[in-house]
Image (cartoon, grey):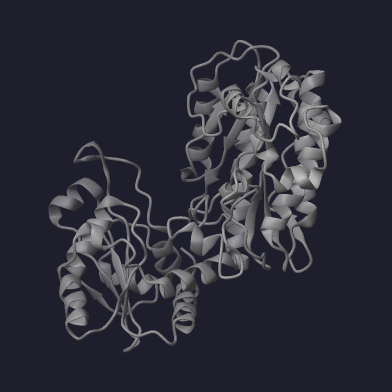
Amino acid sequence: MFSKESYIARREGLRRLMATEKGIVVLPGNVESPMNYPSNCYHFRQDSTFLYLFGLNLPGLCGVIDLDQGTETIFGDDLSMDDIIWTGPQPSVAELAARAGVNRAQPLKELAATVADAARKGRRVHFLPPYRAKTAIQLAELLNVRLDGLKGGESVELALAVVELRSVKSAEELEQLEDAARIGYAMHAAAMRMCRPGGTEAEIAGEIEGIAMKMGAGTSFASIVSQNGETLHNHSHYQQLAEGRLLLVDAGAENAMNYCSDYTRTLPVGGRFSAMQREIYQIVLDANNLGQKLAAPGRLYRDVHLAAMHAIVDGLKALGLMRGDTQEAVAAGAHALFMPHGLGHMMGLDVHDMENIGEKYVGYDRETQRSTQQGLASLRMGRRLGEGMTMTVEPGIYFIPAYIAKWRAEGRCAEFIDFAALERYADFGGIRIEDNIAITSDGCRLIGKRLPATIAEIEEFMA
């Protein structure tokens, strides 16, 4: 945990942002989630907003902030002797609350009475959209509504306040992100050392996930370690590494305080890029570097994304894979055949920070609305950047045979794409290069030491 003063200040910030609102804020923490029978649970992961505001990384807790009376309460149950036999001694809920700077603690059974009393008096109950089934059930029972009655009932005011608070990282949070980056660097360095013909994807996945566990709290998401990089979220690790193929490694770590890193590198199996691979790789690297150059406070991240897409189209035109006016091609969404995702997303306590609250609150706002255009619609974060935001920059180029065949059959963007020239890239795979940045007062900086990124750096490291 940070100091209790940090959590007190965060909750005061939430109150300040919700100064015109009345009622109570209910913030459930997560509970244990069984994997295949009740006592065999998945690794526990606390709800990030609860963690941000209270810092308590244990299951079965709920925080309530009374906006009218100025009180704060942690609800939860002290362990029974049967629990202690299995878990060992644990602090009481009152002791836990005191660590977070909260001076009230009550048994969990009192939570229902508290919420019911507020509802009976016509006071509003503010909650965030639940993303876990057990939390949804808990909220539905507390509010005495059907499960489907929760949808659309979340507090927009609470969502916007939490997003505003968590979007700007404090100095102590940036230190934690640097620590997560250190673990991520170690993971990817190990992957580079192991990327040799005859090895397997599974061996590399196992090694890097072991590093994440050894140095922190595990991975920040399910690792992607695949020679089929054209499949964006490929979690299969069954293949043997083959000379001349590309291995895409998209992996990151959570540190002990649950702050995240998220890096991608694309590696030549055997240590040397082919001429064709070098050409595509350099286009992606140029787009990555451009994204970092342009990311600055006051600039829309959507515009940074579009500038990177212009760079990709220019690069593909130079290879004869695209043609026509670059601006018109991007406006038509022709680049989405090669890069069907966005340039990046926010990161922090979540690897896709706060996306459980809703991308419409996190990545967009009244100024910036999400596009419906192919490719641009997948941009998770389009709003204006501000100092203290932390982001990923992750352009890519992918040759997806089924996707290319579909566009070709439909004649989609044929004025901009040379489908015949694409035939020799049918088994190319995909390349993505991802770095983590923090927005500064006049631009951005990398979080952590940059992994080898240029062709020369990667080949030298792997040698």
Q: Nearer the viewer, residue 394 or 428?
A: 428
- In-image side of 380 versus 10 (left or right): right
The percent position of residue 140, horizontal first and vertical second, equals 21, 62
**Residue at x 20% of width, y 52% of height:** 84
Q: Nearer the viewer, residue 222 or 401?
A: 401
Q: How many marks?
A: 0
Query: In this orientation, does residue 401 appear?
Result: yes
Q: Please, is residue 292 above or below residue 11 in the view?
A: above
The percent position of residue 58, horizontal first and vertical second, equals 32, 57
The percent position of residue 315, horizontal first and vertical second, equals 82, 35
Q: Please, is residue 304 above or below residue 171 in the view?
A: above
Query: In this orientation, does residue 460 appear?
Result: no
**Residue at x 35% of width, y 67% of height:** 154
- In-image side of 189 versus 212 (left or right): right
Tell me where residue 388 sits by quadrant. bottom right
Q: Please, is residue 50 above or below residue 447 in the view?
A: below
- In-image side of 15 versus 225 (left or right): left
Tell me where residue 23 sits by quadrant. bottom left
Tell me where residue 230 sits by quadrant. top right
**Residue at x 35% of width, y 87% of height:** 70
Give the quarter of the figure containing the C terminus.
top right
Q: Please, is residue 91 above or below residue 401 in the view?
A: below
The percent position of residue 133, horizontal first and vertical second, equals 27, 51
